[in-house]
Image (tube, rainbow, N blue to C red):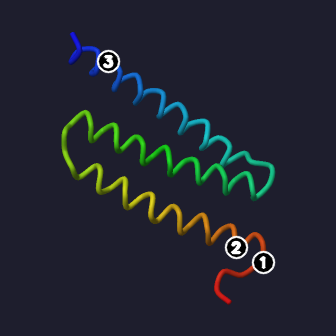
């Protein structure tokens, strides 16, 4: 019973994360200001990392966990660079 419950919970989680990605993508495309778009991009990479972690739980493959780690590292640097660009107008001083 618990394996079947875990399987359904992972499946529902995947659908909800895809729906959350759709909402973040909508905000990324439709955001009224650049700050909204940066926050939507930040949310999008966090949700993508969570989706990869759920895929890793479902398949039992460690490669998904490594990919999620890489996405979060690159996403953090991208968010910091975009924030600095919006504040000062340049990334590299």
Instruction: Residue 84: give its label.
Output: 2
| Residue at screen point 53% across, 63% down | 76
User: Whole-percent x and y of residue 80?
Assistant: 61, 68
Q: Residues within 10 Å of mark 1 (few under 14, many from 20)?
A: few
Mark 2 vs 3, N-terminal side = 3
Where does residue 82 sit, x and y in percent of width and height?
65, 68
Q: What is the secondary structure assignment of the residue under circle 1?
A: helix
Q: How dense is the environment of label 3, judged by Cα within 10 Å: few (below 14), some, or many (20 and up)?
A: few
Alpha-carbon span between mark 2 and mark 3: 42 Å
Question: Would you call the spot at circle 2 few (<14 residues within 10 Å), some (14-19), or many (20 or more)?
Answer: some
x 70%, y 73%: residue: 84
Q: Which residue is mark 3?
A: 8
Residue lying furthest top in this view?
1
The furthest residue to the right: 32
Residues at discs 2 and 1 in contact (Cβ within 8 Å):
yes
User: Could you give the CA–CA distance between mark 2 and mark 1, rounded to whole angstroms?
Assistant: 6 Å
Above-or-below relation of 77 to 43: below
Rendering quarter of residue 60: top left
Asked if residue 60 is positioned above or below residue 92 in the image, the reply reads above
The residue lying furthest to the front in this view is 2
Instruction: Please give the label number shown on residue 88.
Output: 1
Classify 83 as above or below 56: below
Q: Quadrant of residue 85?
A: bottom right
Report the residue at 21% width, 49% height from top: 62
Cα separation between marks 1 and 3: 47 Å
């Amino acid at each position: 019973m618990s394996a079947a419950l875990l399987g359904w919970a992972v499946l529902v989680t995947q659908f909800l994360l895809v729906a959350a990605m759709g909402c973040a993508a909508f905000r990324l495309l439709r955001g009224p200001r650049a700050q909204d778009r940066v926050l939507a991009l930040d949310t999008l990479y966090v949700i993508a990392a969570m989706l990869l972690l759920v895929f890793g739980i479902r398949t039992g493959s460690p490669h998904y966990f490594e990919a999620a780690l890489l996405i979060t590292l690159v996403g953090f640097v991208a968010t910091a660079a975009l924030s600095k660009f919006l504040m000062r107008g340049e990334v590299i001083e």
